Amino acid sequence: MSATELNTDKLITDLKRLVSDSEELLHATKDAAGDKAHEVRERLADALESAKRSCRRLEDKAIEGAKTADRTIRDHPYQSIGIALGVGLVIGVLVAKK
């Protein structure tokens, strides 16, 4: 898994946790009175919906990227093996020099 994929997975996990925590906060403050509390709850609800949409888009992009990589590897197995071997060799040489 590449660094980008790991970062994407971490971002998705963090967004899901944020959504969950925000939903708990909205539920816990549902009885709060006052215009300011109502305004904050509305802003939080809007931000929550935006985070949910972003999370869905990121998940869709991650799935599409994985499907594309899988399709490419299946279409060109020998080239994929050669590239992986070359990258591994270069990394091995660079690590061995240090």
Image (cartoon, grey):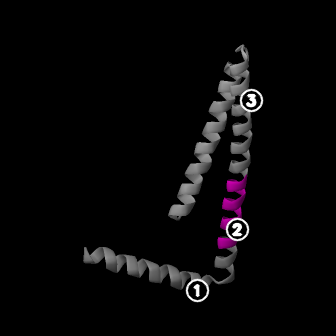
The residue under the point 62% across, 82% down is 77
**Hey, what amino acid is under mark 2?**
Lys
Q: Quadrant of the C terminus?
A: bottom left
Looking at the picture, tell me which residue is in the foreground, 25 or 2: 25
The disc, 1 or 3, on the residue closer to the chain's N-terminal end is: 3
Disc 2/disc 3 C-alpha distance (Å): 38 Å
| Viewer-side label of 2, 3 | 3
The residue under the point 68% across, 44% down is 51
In the rendered image, the vertical position of residue 71 relative to residue 62, given as above or below: below
Disc 1/disc 3 C-alpha distance (Å): 53 Å
Q: Secondary structure at mark 1?
A: helix
**Hey, what amino acid is under mark 1?**
Gln
Would you say the residues marked 2 and 3 are in contact, meaning their CB atoms lie under 8 Å apart? no
Could you tell whether 47 is left or right of 82 in the image? right
Disc 2/disc 1 C-alpha distance (Å): 18 Å
The image's mark for residue 42 is 3
Looking at the picture, tell me which residue is in the foreground, 62 or 37: 37
Q: Secondary structure at mark 2?
A: helix
In the rendered image, the vertical position of residue 64 relative to residue 30, given as above or below: below
On the image, numbered disc 2 is attached to which residue?
67
**Residue 37 at x, y percent in the picture:** 69, 20
**Residue 74 at x, y percent in the picture:** 67, 78
Q: Is residue 49 magenta?
A: no
Could you tell whether 11 is left or right of 54 in the image? left
